[in-house]
Each structure stands twice: as structure tokens, then as C-alpha cells.
Amino acid sequence: MIVGIQGSRTYNDYASFIHGMAMPLRLMPITDKKLTVFSAGPKRINEMALEFLNVSDFKSRGISVKLIYMPESWFRNNFEKIEMFIYFCSKKETFSSLANFLDNKEIDVRAWRYDEIKDKNK
């Protein structure tokens, strides 16, 4: 399965990210033994994706994984290669221009939103 990801600059909830990344795994055909994640960033999303792919036990399930960082332009020029695109953001934020573009190209675009918890002491 080939999955594209992107997040807003403020997205930083790793626990929520893990749940969002589980979605393509649940939808992945049992015969598919390869997961390729193309990330459009930003840096924090790239870091979370790398950590998720490194700590998850894909090898024991016979699944090979690969994370590739790509600019937005690559997604726009190669959208037909992507099976699913997940945009990570808070509930208040709207889709990025890339997520909107892919949605208009009839790619399976999902928004994974979380509630921001404000620190009462700040």
C-alpha cells in the first residue's frame, strides 16, 4: 500500500498520530506485504512517521516498510500512485492546499484531527 501523509505545522500529538497511521494498516489487503509512506512534512510529521515505522513490529507480520520524504510538487505530479492520503491537524484547522488538491483528484483523503489540550498553568 502507498500512503501519503502531511500535517499542519502545529500538529504534535504522537498518540493521535499512531491511531491515524493504523487506519491504512486496517484497510491494507492481507496479501499486501509492502507499506510505503510518502511524507510531505513538516519536520515533526516526518519525525513521528519515522518513529512509528521503526517501533512498530512490521517484520513479524512480514511487511516491509519504507518512508520517503517528498515535496508537495511530487504529490501533485504523481497523485495517481497514492492509494490513501492522511492529513494530520487539530480540530480547528482546515485541509492544506495539497489535501484539497488530492481530494479533488478522487484520492482517498482522510483528515486525522485531535483536540488540543491547553495547559491550564500557561
Image (cartoon, rainbow, N blue to C red):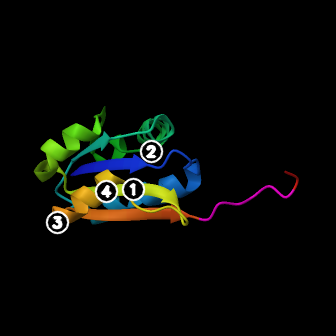
Please give the name of the residue rendered at 27% of the width and 45% of the height, measured from the top-left corner.
62
Instruction: Provide the residue span drawn in magenta.
Output: 115-120
Q: Is residue 87 above or below residue 34?
A: below
Q: Name the residue under label 4.
A: 99
Q: Confirm or deny contact between disc 1 and disc 4 (CB under 8 A).
A: yes
Which tag, 3 or 2, sits closer to the chain's start? Answer: 2
Q: Mark 2 points at which residue?
A: 56
Residue 23 % position (x, y) = 37, 62
Amino acid type, label 3: Glu
Q: Name the residue under label 3.
A: 106
Q: How crowded is mark 3: few (under 14 residues within 10 Å), some or many (20 or more)?
A: few
Which tag, 1 or 4, sits closer to the chain's start? Answer: 1
Q: Distance between the residues labelled 4 and 3?
A: 11 Å
Q: How far apart are marks 2 and 4 (CA)?
A: 26 Å
Q: Distance between the residues labelled 1 and 2?
A: 20 Å
Q: Is mark 2 on a helix, strand or loop?
A: loop
Which tag, 2 or 4, sits closer to the chain's start? Answer: 2
Residue 53 % position (x, y) = 41, 40
Q: Name the residue under label 1.
A: 87
